[in-house]
Image: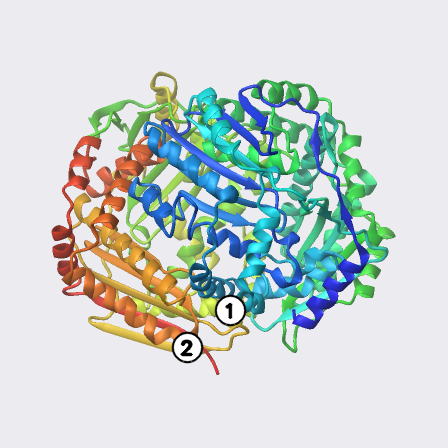
Amino acid sequence: MNKIVLLLFASVFLCSGLVSKAQYTTTIPLNSKVKQGKLSNGLTYYILHNEEPKDRASFYFVQNVGGILEEDSQNGLAHFLEHMAFNGLENFPGKNMLDYLEKNGILFGRDINAYTAQDQTVYNISNIPTGSEGLMDSALLVLHDWSGGLLLEGKEIESERGVIHEEWRTRRNVRKRLGDQTSSVMYNNSKYAVRDVIGSLDVIDHFEHKELRDYYEKWYRPDLQAVVIVGDVDAESIEKKVKDLFSKIPMKKNTAERTYTKVEDSKEVGYVAAKDKEAKNLSIMWLFRYDLDAVKNETTQRNDLAKGMFNQMLAARISENTKKLECSAIGIEFGGYELARTKGADYIYVAPKSGKELEAFTEALTELERVKRYGFTASELERTKVQYMRSYESYAANYSKITNDKWAEQLGDLFLKAEPFPSLEWEMEFAAKTIPAITLEEVNAFVKSYSNVDNSALILQGPDNETQVYPTKEELLAVAAKVKSSDVEAYIDEAGNQPLVAKKLKPVKILSQFGVEGTDAKGYVLENGAKVVILPTEYSKDEISMSSFSFGGTSLIADKDLASADMAASIVEMSGVGEFDATQLQKKLAGKIVGLSASLGELTEGFSGSASPQDFETLLQLLYLNFEAPRFEEAPFSAQMARMRDYVANIKVDNNKALQDTIALVSTNYSPRTLLFGENFINKIDFNRASEIYKERFSNASDFTFIFVGNINEKEHLPMIRKYIGNISSTNKKEAYLDHKVGPAKGITSRIFERKMAVPKTTVNYDMQGDFEYNLKNRMMLNVVSQLLSKRYMVTIREEEGGSYGVQVSPSASKLPSPEYSLNISFDCNPEKRDRLVEIVKEEIVKIQNEACDAVDLNEIKNNFIKSREEAELENSFWMSSIQKNLMLGSELTSKEDYIKMIENIDADSIQKFAKEIFKNVNTVEVIMNPKK
């Protein structure tokens, strides 16, 4: 949006004075385990003892201020100020705060972060080890300085301009550009339309330092701030420290009042058609605004439940419709969100097939009209209620595993928006009495959410080309009028009542047992040859995770059939299993906490899934049916093909797709086995061949290993495993994968190309691959090298050059089909700085081989590895991965004690030696995408 229009919108806002002093409140009692208080200077605090993860705490600093409070001359400075909170504090000058925390294994980006929104700014330091009182006190001191101790030194401000300029460049993608065109209509010309947080580039590059300091002095103050601490802490002790430290912060005099910008109701339907040359497909959104409830009470909670049921049942009907070939839409969605602090929005979203714009819009409105005339059925509501109650039961079972960060975020919402934070007992009692009492009439009434047409907006976004048709406001409203007077039949709810598995199965014998070294897992070989591994844990009380694998994958598929193979598992997913098509199966599983999906990879095929312990048998039944009775239905397949063809019709304008395709081709030396999604890919998919491939790859239980980790009871659940997995057909044939020797060309390969861009930027992708002895120590050394380079690029490219918002350094290592490593370096940048930044990338790679790395950086990385390992061992995913690596790759699990010793023995000399070794015979792929001049 151009500067003149921005100023016009701003002037409209300033003249109207549309602000509110109202703030939210709640009548729902606060969880008594939360220590809450307000200091004499106005600062609010919340402290909660929680043990997920154990011996860790998260510190959040929540500010009820954001971009909406900026003056025009400050547009973007709320976000700029967030950056400055990491560039010099009263008690931590310069980068001392980050250096100190990272030295203790608390990483910037992962554990230390912040975000700025239009109405709030939130900082966090997560996963602080609670055993270190000094570290805990230092985290409190950082929060104290975030309140009013930002140094805002001129040199640091100037240094950060380039970083934020590049963030602006990176974030100004097609979605952002389309949003800029629609914001005035969406927000009805309120100030929200001209406060997008990232701000004006002119302001970012040229503002006087005083503007930043003025915003800071005006709005960073204790009466608009909250300290939130959640973790394995003594809440009373922490409360005393908070009071002692934060009470010393003086309340400023003659403070500005924090008002809340209103998005006024419109008096007629708004309309905007936003176009961009890099957009691929048209979307139509009809947005209906409404005022959010100022008081959050039991009535609003009940309404939220009923509205959620409405949306869920409508989504299920839409899902049925979009599976049909005759459906005119790629996708249809109904939903809602918080548009602004005081305004909500419900929406109808339609992504039409090309040339079917009005037809797709008609189909979406017809489903809404069907609900308006006939409502939902009693059976639909009953299924949904069962699902809701089971969700609450699962929530209660896993309550102790809810993380510190999740609770801290919710307490932040309590401070900002009075979102209720009740006890578990209150929630379960409320659910138990409310969910059964919700009536069809209550749920059906939410169709009125889409009736206030005058306070709505039609927002179209799509490609800027000569072929795309954009329906006018009049045409779309004519469709709405026509649907109201059209013949609409009542919905018929068809759900099968037969059991999932009707066949009578008996548990088979166990032929032998085995162990998995380094774990307490037990392995069993069943009568049909299937291998099963069970590891009971208590990390998540309402979850049993499952993963399975068999060697072969697409490596055994001919080149010409690879596209069909890519679609094989999806056909079953959209078709169903046994006696149930996909829609009937979804209804059959209502109220079950269960999920299962198939995957066909390059070297393996398998299933992954999870279930609550009480639904474990359902998981096994689904697994059995996916082997023994998969369905292959051509109708949903054809509908999916039609959606895919429509999606790719304009895909050539997608610059990111062009970049990723180029990287894929060059990295595989243009192998015929490299798949690129597009029209040619779709044309090669054959329904019959895809179905055959599924049957070939997902058969023969004797070639599969099934791993279960979680709250599994061997006495109760092993007989079920023997019953269902034990009865999967088997041929006792063992398969192996084929190594097609796919990889980059030897030596250095460079591919530089240009693309038309609305916002000029260069994207650099630099990838190094080489042979590698696959073991834990080498994988850790590779990670160390990666993180050392990342730290160096943070200093040299981001801070010193101001050349990029961030450089991503991503290591990977694999043993199959042959041991090798990859180190990928990628970033966006100013095209004018490209050559120098690429030079720096290469210079740092040379330096790490020829010079000793920084001892402080190395120590920080090692501490982080040790801290991460301690946290990982408390997750089911860690043990699942460890068992898989043992069984697939022969990798033994290293004990925590041996792991720590190994990490402690890593020093600068060993890193330098390792770097020289891996970069000695490396194949390099450099892909650079530049803007076309």
Residue lying furthest right in this view?
A: 485
Give above or below for 482 relative to 530: below
Q: State whether residue 284 appears in this view.
A: no
Indicate the amino acid at tag 1.
Asp
Q: Identify residue for label 2.
A: 832
- Direction from residue 747 to residue 182 in the image, left or right: right
Q: Is residue 836 left or right of residue 263?
A: left
Q: Residue at x 53, y 46 (%)?
A: 575
Q: Secondary structure at mark 2?
A: helix
Looking at the figure, which quarter contains the N terminus? bottom right
Mark 1 or 2 closer to N-term? 1
Residue depicted at x 56% and y 70%? 278
Locate residue 873: give its quadrant.
Answer: top left
Measured from the top left, where is residue 419 in percent x and y? Answer: 64, 33
Other-residue count near label 1 (Cα within 10 Å), few / some / many at <14 / 14–19 / ≥20: some
**Along the line of sight, the residue nearer the viewer: 646 or 928:** 928
Is 397 situated left or right of 878 in this image?
Answer: right
Report the Cα–Cα distance between label 1 and label 2: 23 Å
Above or below for 613 versus 320: above
Residue 158 in the image, given as x and y percentages of width and height:
45, 64
Disc 2 residue crowd, few under 14, some 14–19, many 20+, Cα 10 Å: few
Q: Nearer the viewer, residue 436 or 189?
A: 189
In the rendered image, residue 459, in percent from the top left (x then y), is placed at: 71, 60
Find residue 786 and name its label. Answer: none
What secondary structure is marked by label 1?
loop
Residue type (three-letter) at the residue carrying disc 2: Glu
Q: Which residue is mark 1?
A: 654
